[in-house]
DNA sequence: CTGTAACACTTAACCGATCAAGCTATCGGT
DNA sequence: ACCGATAGCTTGATCGGTTAAGTGTTACAG
C-alpha cells in the first residue's frame, strides 16, 4: 500500500513508546524513583508517587514487557498448549470454555495467555522447553493428563510452574486440579437406574486420558455394585463421527442399551442423531446423558440431559492456582466439586419397563 | 533424553538457561559472533557458524525472547482479541478454526499467539495500546469488523501491523482479508429457488458487523433481482437461543418461509431443533442452509446443507499476510474465495410446489 | 613492496526495565 | 553539638540479546 514503518533516515516519523525515562525527565526524578513509584515499592514519598503515577497515566505509559522480563521480573504471561486436531478443537466447547475462564483471572492481573496448537505430546514438551528457554511464559496449563505423561518430568526438570487439569494422577511437584468424575458418573447411573434402566452403556473419550480411565473405572464399579452386569464402555475420541459410529455399534445389538452416557456433548449430539436416523425415539427408546453441558445440549431436540459443571469457573480456579504457584506461594491440589445432573428431555423411563 | 541445563555451582538447584554467552565461551568466540552465526548474518566463516550451531543444538539453546525484543528485534508474537461472551465463544466453531489456521503458519516460524478475551471493542483498543506499549506483540489479527470501527484508527495511530478479517471495509493502511459473502449467498438463494422455494428468509448474525451487512445487502439484492418480494432478514446474535427464537418468530407466520438461511451453524442447528419441536419436517416443510460448515452440520439429523469454506486455510492465509506486513513487505488486500454450497439432507423442494 | 579491500572476527553501546548500594538531608535522642 | 537512623532519593550494574564501529589478518592488484 503506502509508506509503512518508515524509519532510518532523518525525520523518523516512528511512533515513540513512552518509557520510564520519559516519565523521569518530566517528573524531574531518576528512572529508579519512577520504577519504585509505579511498582508500589517503598523508596519514594507519597507526593512524588502520585505525581509520577499521574504523568504515567497522562502519557499512556505501559512498561515494556521485554525489559521487565529481562530484568528478572516475570514475563507476565502463561502458556497453554492444545494437542487436538483442528477439526476437534473447532467444535469441542470445552477448551474455549476453559480459556474464557483462564482469561477472567489473567486479564484482571494483565497476564497474557500464549496459545499453541500442537500435534503430539512430544511436541508439547518441545514447546515447553522453547517457552522456558525463551523466557516467554512464567507457567503453563497442562490439560489431558495421561498415564506416565511425558510432559510431567519435563516440566519438573525445567521447574516451570504448572497446573495440571484432568487428573488426578502422578504429577510430582506440579499442582493439580480435577473434578470429581467418579461422583458425577455415579449420580448419572443412579438416576438412570431410578428411571428403570438396566442396560446402560457409555461412549467414552480418548482412552489414554487419565480422566477417561477414572470415569471408566467408576462407571464399571458403580454398575457392578448396583447389579448391572453388562455395563459396557465403548472407547471413542470425542469426535462426532466416532461418537456416532460407537452409538450405531451399540444400537445394532439385539440386547441394545436403553440408555447411553457420552463423555462429551459433541458425541452425545451425534448419538442422538444416529438414534433418530435409526428410527429410535429419544427418550422413548433410548435415553441420552451428555457429559459437560454446553449450549449445544439445549440446542438440539430433545434437549439433552447433561452432567453440568461450570467450565469457566474451573478454568478461573486453575488460573488462580497457576498464578499462586508462579508467585511461589504454596499451592495444594484441589478437587473442584462434582458435576451435577441437569435433567432435560433426553432421559425418561425405558419403554419396556 | 540426555542431561540438559544441569550447571551452576553444584548446590544451586536453580535451573540455568543457556545464553549466547555460554555458547560463546564454549566455542571460544565472542557473543557477537554467536549472534551473527545463529541469525544467519554475514560476519562469521561457515566453519565457525556450523560449530556454533552445533553447540547451540547440544546445550538446547533458545534465544531469550525478552532480550531479543528489547534489542529492537521483533517480539516474535502476534495477538488476537476475542470480543464475544464466553457462552458464545465456547460453542462457536469459527474462532477455534481460525486459530488453528493461524497456528499452522505461526508455529512454523515459531511465532507465539497471544490471546485475550475482552468484553467490548473499547476494551480491545485498550488491549492494543497495552500490547503495543509493552512491546508484547508485533502485530494483531482483527476480527468482526464494524462500520466506523473504533479499533482501526487506534491501530493506524500506533502503526501496529494488523490484518483485518471480516470486511471489506474502510481500514486505511491496514491489510484486509475477506471472503466473498455476496457470491456465496447468491449461490444459496439460486439453489433454493431452483428447488422451487419462493419464500426464503434469513437469520442474520450480529447486525453491527460489516460482513453481516454485506450479506444482508446481497441477500436483499439477489432476492429482489430474482423476483422474490418478501425476502426478510431477522437479525440475531449467533447464539443458539436467539437463533431458535428468530426461527420461531418466522415459523408462526401464516405465510411462513419454506427455506431459511442462517448466518452460522449454531443458529442453524437451533433452528432445526425449533422446526422439529413445532412438528415441521426438515426438509419437507422447511429447508435449512447453514453458513460455515463445521462438523456440527453433519452431526445433526438431517445433516445440514451448508455454505462451506476452509476456515483454517482462511486463518493460515491471514497469518501469512500478517507476517508479511510485520516484515515490512507490501501486502495487498485479498478476497479469499467464495464459500461453496455443500448440499445435504436439510434442503429439498418445498412440499407445496 | 605497498595500499587497500574483503573477511572474520571483537568490542562495546544499547534496548528499558529492576534493584542493590550509595548518598544526602532531616530528625530524634542524648 | 554530635551521632545514628531513616526517609527519599540517585547511581549504576544487570538481564541477554543485537548491531554499529573497530581491529587484525590475509589476499591481491598496481
Image (tube, coloured by chain):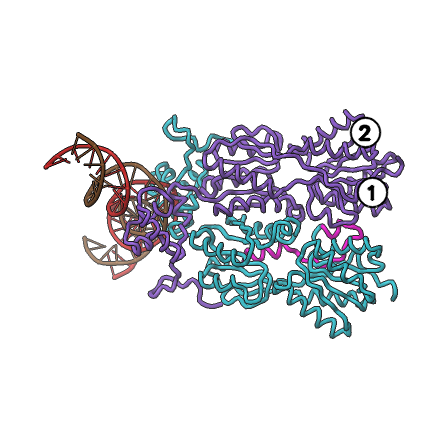
Chain colours: A purple, B cyan, C brown, D red
Provide the chain ID for the residue under circle 1.
Answer: A
Residue B177: horizontal and vertical position, in percent? 58, 62
* On screen, residue B246 above or below A231: below
| Neighbourhood count class around disc 2 (C-alpha, 10 Å): few under 14, some 14–19, many 20 upward | some
Q: Secondary structure at mark 1?
A: loop
Given residues A168 and B137, the one toward you in this image is A168
Residue A138: horizontal and vertical position, in percent? 47, 40
Pick the quarter of the image with the C terminus of chain B: bottom right
Span colored in magenta = B296-321
Residue A84: mark: none
**Number of marks in the image?**
2
Residue A283: mark: 1
Provide the chain ID for the residue under circle 2.
Answer: A
**Left or right: where C15 falls relative to B292:** left
At x 77%, y 71%, the residue is B230
* On screen, residue A225 above or below B126: above
**Left or right: where B51 falls relative to B278:** left
At x 59%, y 38%, the residue is A143
Q: Which residue is mark 2?
A: A230
Given residues A347 and A131, the one toward you in this image is A347
Gap in angstroms between the C-alphas marked 2 and 1: 21 Å
Q: Secondary structure at mark 2?
A: loop
Q: Residue furthest right?
A: A352
At x 67%, y 37%, the residue is A339
Q: Earlier in the sequence, mark 2 or mark 1?
A: 2
| Residue A245, magenta (yes or no) | no
Decide if residue A4 is in sight here. Answer: yes
At x 28%, y 51%, the residue is A29
Amino acid at each position: 500500500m503506502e509508506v509503512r514503518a518508515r524509519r532510518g533516515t532523518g525525520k523518523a516519523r516512528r511512533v515513540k513508546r513512552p518509557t520510564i525515562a520519559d516519565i523521569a525527565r518530566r517528573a524531574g526524578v531518576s528512572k529508579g524513583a519512577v520504577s519504585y513509584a509505579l511498582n508500589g515499592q517503598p523508596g519514594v514519598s507519597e507526593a512524588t508517587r502520585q505525581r509520577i503515577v499521574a504523568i504515567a497515566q497522562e502519557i499512556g505509559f505501559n512498561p515494556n514487557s521485554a525489559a521487565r522480563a529481562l530484568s528478572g521480573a516475570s514475563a507476565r504471561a502463561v502458556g497453554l498448549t492444545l494437542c487436538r486436531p483442528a477439526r476437534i478443537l473447532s467444535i469441542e466447547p470445552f477448551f474455549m470454555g476453559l480459556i474464557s475462564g483462564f482469561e477472567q483471572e489473567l486479564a484482571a492481573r494483565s497476564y497474557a495467555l500464549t496459545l499453541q496448537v500442537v500435534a503430539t505430546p512430544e511436541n508439547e514438551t518441545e514447546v515447553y522447553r522453547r517457552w522456558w528457554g525463551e523466557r516467554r511464559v512464567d507457567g503453563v496449563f497442562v490439560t489431558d493428563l495421561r498415564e506416565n505423561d511425558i510432559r510431567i518430568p519435563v516440566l519438573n526438570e525445567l521447574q516451570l510452574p504448572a497446573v495440571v487439569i484432568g487428573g488426578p494422577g502422578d504429577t510430582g511437584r506440579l499442582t493439580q486440579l480435577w473434578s470429581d468424575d467418579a461422583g458425577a458418573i455415579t449420580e448419572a447411573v443412579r438416576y438412570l437406574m431410578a428411571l428403570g434402566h438396566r442396560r446402560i452403556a457409555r461412549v467414552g473419550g480418548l482412552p489414554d486420558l487419565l480422566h477417561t480411565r477414572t470415569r471408566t473405572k467408576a462407571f464399571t464399579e458403580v454398575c457392578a455394585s448396583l447389579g448391572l452386569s453388562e455395563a459396557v464402555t465403548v472407547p471413542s475420541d470425542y469426535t462426532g463421527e466416532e461418537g456416532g459410529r460407537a452409538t450405531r455399534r451399540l444400537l445394532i445389538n439385539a440386547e441394545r442399551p436403553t440408555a447411553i452416557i457420552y463423555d462429551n456433548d459433541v458425541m452425545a449430539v451425534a448419538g442422538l442423531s444416529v438414534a433418530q436416523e435409526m428410527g429410535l425415539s429419544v427418550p422413548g427408546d433410548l435415553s441420552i446423558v451428555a457429559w459437560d453441558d454446553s449450549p449445544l445440549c439445549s440446542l438440539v431436540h430433545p434437549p439433552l440431559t447433561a452432567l453440568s459443571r461450570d467450565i469457566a469457573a474451573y478454568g478461573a480456579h486453575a488460573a488462580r492456582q497457576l498464578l499462586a504457584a508462579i508467585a511461589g506461594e504454596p499451592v495444594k491440589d484441589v478437587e473442584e466439586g462434582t458435576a451435577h445432573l441437569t435433567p432435560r428431555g433426553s432421559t425418561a423411563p425405558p419403554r419396556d419397563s
